[in-house]
Image (cartoon, rainbow, N blue to C red):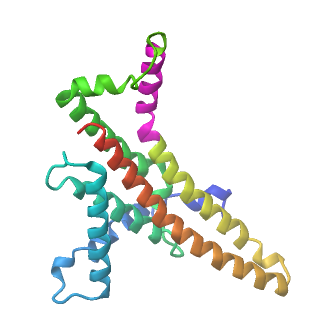
Amino acid sequence: MMSNLFSIFDPSTSLGFPLNWFSTTLGVLIMPLAFWVTSNRYSLLVSRVVTALHQEFSTLLGANMKAGHTVLFVTFFVYIVFNNLLGLVPYIFTASSHLVMTLALSLPMWVGIMFYGWFNHTKHMLAHLVPLGTPGPLMPLMVLIETISNIIRPGTLAVRLAANMIAGHLLLVLLGNQGPMVSSSILTLLLVTQILLLVLETAVAAIQSYVFAVLATLYSSEVI
């Protein structure tokens, strides 16, 4: 019995250990494509997705991109979309709905980008604090605004991903709890609605992963 609605996101188990977090490592069993003897539909699909993402991220990073620069952002997408889709399976913990995980992805990435930018492109980072054409009296205010905007970036990345995953799951749970209390005719409509919401959540899982990876790529492109 749930103590409250948000207890569906509780990572604890009856054994007293957060074993549900181990679900984030299940991708290790299926992702290494190099161990497949022959290509199958799954490996071809993953290869096409990775190739398309590499081309798009290369375009966003521009001519200053270093070799292997897109690997980090493609990995972000694959890891997040795997956890998002895995969370839609019944009785499997949705790790990406927790700020602990989303912040663990966004904060180190942002800190690394900032260190790289300030140590290697200090003048560019300082110039970026004042947009081109800003009047002189407004420059101190623009520096403050740009600094705050830069600092909250990892938080916005983490909250956006977690909030979108929580919202869909809560809606599915709220509708699912109405099943025992409605008539058979309304139950049919409820099931159809649940299926449509599940399809929508599948799309949201992929879109949010893509948004996270693209924004991380854009943040990185600003410092190179």
Observer-nearest of 84 and 29: 84
Residue 133, percent across and down?
Answer: 42, 22
Picture quarter with the N terminus: bottom right
Q: Is residue 165 above or below residue 195?
A: above
Q: Is residue 107 above or below residue 86?
A: above
Residue at the far front: name it.
133
Answer whether residue 204 is visible to the viewer in this image: yes
Q: Is residue 143 magenta?
A: yes
Residue 197 falls left or right of residue 223: right
Residue 178, percent across and down?
Answer: 77, 72
Q: Is residue 24 above or below residue 42?
A: above
Picture quarter with the C terminus: top left
User: Measuring 64% from the left and 79% from the top, which residue is drawn there?
Assistant: 195
Residue 35 falls left or right of residue 131: left
- Give the dominant element type of the magenta stretch: helix, strand or loop: helix
User: Measuring 42% from the left and 60% from the top, which residue is drawn there?
Assistant: 209
User: Measuring 27% from the left and 71% from the top, which residue is drawn there?
Assistant: 28
The range drawn in magenta is 139-155
Q: Which of the 4 image quadrants contains residue 181?
A: bottom right
Residue 3, percent across and down?
Answer: 67, 57
